[in-house]
Amino acid sequence: MKPIRYYPFAPSKTFGSFTDCFFNNSIADFFGSDFTLSSPSVNVIEDGDFYRIEVAAPGLEKGDFEVNVENGFLNISAEHKEKEEVKEGKYMRREFNYTSFKRSFELPDIVKADKIEATYKDGILKVKLPKKAEAKAPDAHLVKIK
């Protein structure tokens, strides 16, 4: 449910579109796509002997990520800084872009925390969390009726 905002004045039609954009839409919509405050999309998949976490993070490099386990939590973070500088005669332009995020996941007791593996390829960080032997589902079998 979206909260109802109270305006002490009734915005006019010309001013209303600006206030609607600023107050009702996200900050990224107002400032543009270069300004984001979101975390990447994450899929958590259970696959027999392990769980897999997939983090959609295109545009980053393998070295931008840090994956660690601390106090029963899996922490995934990334930080990427870009600096572009153009000099032409007396003209100089500098642009900076900074991207970062951090996601934490509480690990269930059935995960072997010391055997977690991570790979990054094609803009997707994949973290494989193997299950302990006692947590694996038993093989399907027929129960004999007596």
Image: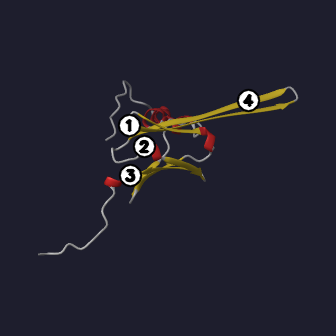
Marks 1 & 2, CB-CB < 8 Å contact: yes
Q: Secondary structure at mark 3?
A: loop
Q: Residues within 10 Å of mark 2 (few under 14, many from 20)?
A: many
Helix, strand or loop status at disc 2: helix
In the picture, the quarter occupied by the C terminus is bottom left
**Front-lying residue, 100 or 136:** 136
State the image coordinates of residue 105 (x, y, percent, origin top left): 40, 41
The residue beneath circle 4 is 94
Q: Locate residue 101, reporting x and y percent.
A: 51, 36
Determine the residue positioned at 31% across, 60% down: 137
**For residue 113, which numbered disc appears in the image?**
2
* Farthest residue, direction right: 89
Report the front residue among 81 and 50: 50
Mark earlier in primary sequence (4, 3): 4
Up-down relation of residue 145 to residue 76 (above or below): below
Kind of residue at disc 1: Gly
**Residue 3, image x, y percentages:** 33, 35
Of the two numbered discs 3 and 2 on the same chain, state the one appearing first in sequence.
Answer: 2
Label 2 to label 4, Cα distance in Å? 43 Å
Identified by mark 2, the residue type is Ala
Numbered tag placed on residue 72 in the rendering: 1
At x 62%, y 40%, the residue is 63
Report the Cα–Cα distance between label 4 and label 3: 49 Å
- Find out whether the residues at labels 3 and 2 contact each other: C-beta distance under 8 Å: no
Q: At 80% from the left edge and 28% from the top edge, which residue is drawn?
A: 92
Q: Residues within 10 Å of mark 4 (few under 14, many from 20)?
A: few
